[in-house]
Image (spheres, rainbow, N blue to C red):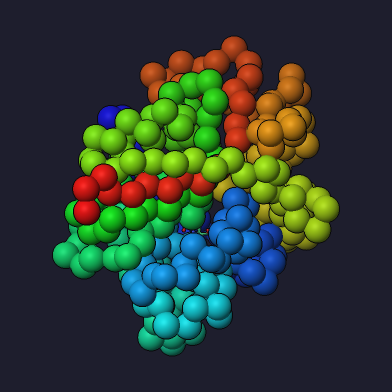
């Protein structure tokens, strides 16, 4: 287990309008698009918990297909909760919690982390092992380091093997599905789409530390090579300083990222 860097509202400081400009009307982040295209995974679900639910964009999509599901969302950002609950949908209620410390007595047919788990410590998963038989995680993964820490984004990107042993240790089997080029939207990298939004922001918003970091990440993606299997390799021009979990900077950002889905099912139900 590693100690995660505690996020201080990375998503919270930029305003709702800023995120709307960057993310567009759907208000979902990058690999979440895979979930939007695979809503079938919610077909036999009556109750679900979304950990790190953001602005609730994916939940509104899920509920427009499967209107009977009751979804609880948790996020550490108050403005996201206010935004979600302003829709007054009794089937989707969000609450502010730090997912790293969150526990509940509720049982859920499905607990999912859509592009949130890389912000969270292992406890966000292990604390919930008694609350479901099924987890679904969609996120970025590292191929060559057990945990890559990206300070600016408060991210801990783990390998598939790391997740495999984590889930096995709490009695779950895992299955992976690699997502091929999930970050393409309208024939453009999602990050190019975001970059346009960032460039349209007033200077006061554009200079926020989070937006500066996001802009850098979008630029960095231009320097990534998309491999045949959908993974991304940073080339020499990549600028984001990566460090592994012992804090030492890598001499160059050579890690290979890819995005994939983890399905975890309890071994003995
Ligand atoms: C990239 S966004 C993904 C949002 C949404 N699930 C989606 O797919 O569009 C990551 C989310 O994780 C949330 N998050 C980060 N750290 C958290 C924590 N410690 N506790 C709860 N939520 C957290 C952020 O506030 C944000 O809503």
Decide which of 201, 83 is in the foreground and name it: 83
Residue 18 as seen in the image, left or right of residue 49: right
Residue at 69%, 37% (x, y): give it. Answer: 230
**Which quarter holds ligand 1?**
bottom left
Residue 41 as seen in the image, left or right of residue 235: left
Residue 240 spot, x, y in % from top left = 63, 29
Decide which of 40, 74 is in the foreground and name it: 40
Decide which of 52, 160 is in the foreground and name it: 160
When asked about the image quadrant of residue 180, the answer is: top right
Residue at 40%, 77% (x, y): give it. Answer: 69
Residue 190 spot, x, y in % from top left = 72, 51
Decide which of 172, 36 is in the foreground and name it: 172
Residue at 57%, 48% (x, y): give it. Answer: 210
Is residue 252 something one can see in this rendering? Answer: yes
Residue, far right? 187
Is residue 203 something one can see in this rendering? Answer: no
Residue, far front? 268
When asked about the image quadrant of residue 17, the answer is: bottom right
Residue 41 spot, x, y in % from top left = 49, 62
Residue 124 spot, x, y in % from top left = 30, 48
């Amino acid at each position: 287990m590693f100690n995660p860097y505690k996020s201080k509202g990375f998503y919270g400081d930029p305003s709702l309008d800023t995120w709307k400009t960057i993310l567009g009307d759907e208000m979902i982040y990058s690999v979440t698009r895979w979930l939007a295209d695979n809503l079938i995974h919610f077909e036999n679900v009556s109750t679900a918990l979304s950990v790190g639910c953001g602005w609730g964009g994916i939940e509104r999509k899920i509920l427009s297909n499967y209107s009977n599901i009751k979804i609880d969302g948790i996020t550490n950002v108050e403005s996201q909760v206010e935004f979600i609950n302003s829709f007054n949908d009794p089937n989707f209620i969000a609450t502010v919690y730090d997912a790293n410390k969150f526990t509940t007595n509720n049982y859920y047919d499905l607990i999912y982390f859509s592009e949130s788990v890389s912000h969270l410590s292992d406890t966000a998963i292990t604390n919930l092992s008694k609350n479901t038989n099924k987890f679904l995680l969609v996120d970025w993964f590292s191929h060559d380091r057990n945990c890559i820490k990206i300070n600016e984004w408060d991210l801990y990107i783990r390998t598939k093997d790391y997740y495999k042993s984590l889930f096995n240790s709490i009695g779950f089997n895992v299955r992976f599905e690699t997502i091929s080029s999930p970050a393409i939207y309208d024939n453009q990298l999602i990050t190019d789409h975001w970059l346009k939004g960032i460039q349209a922001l007033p200077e006061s918003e554009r200079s926020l530390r989070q937006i500066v970091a996001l802009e850098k990440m979008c630029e960095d993606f231009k320097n990534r090579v998309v491999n045949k299997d959908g993974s991304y390799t940073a080339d020499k021009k990549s600028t984001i300083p990566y460090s592994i979990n012992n804090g030492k900077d890598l001499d160059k950002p050579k890690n290979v990222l890819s995005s994939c889905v983890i399905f975890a099912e309890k071994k003995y139900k």
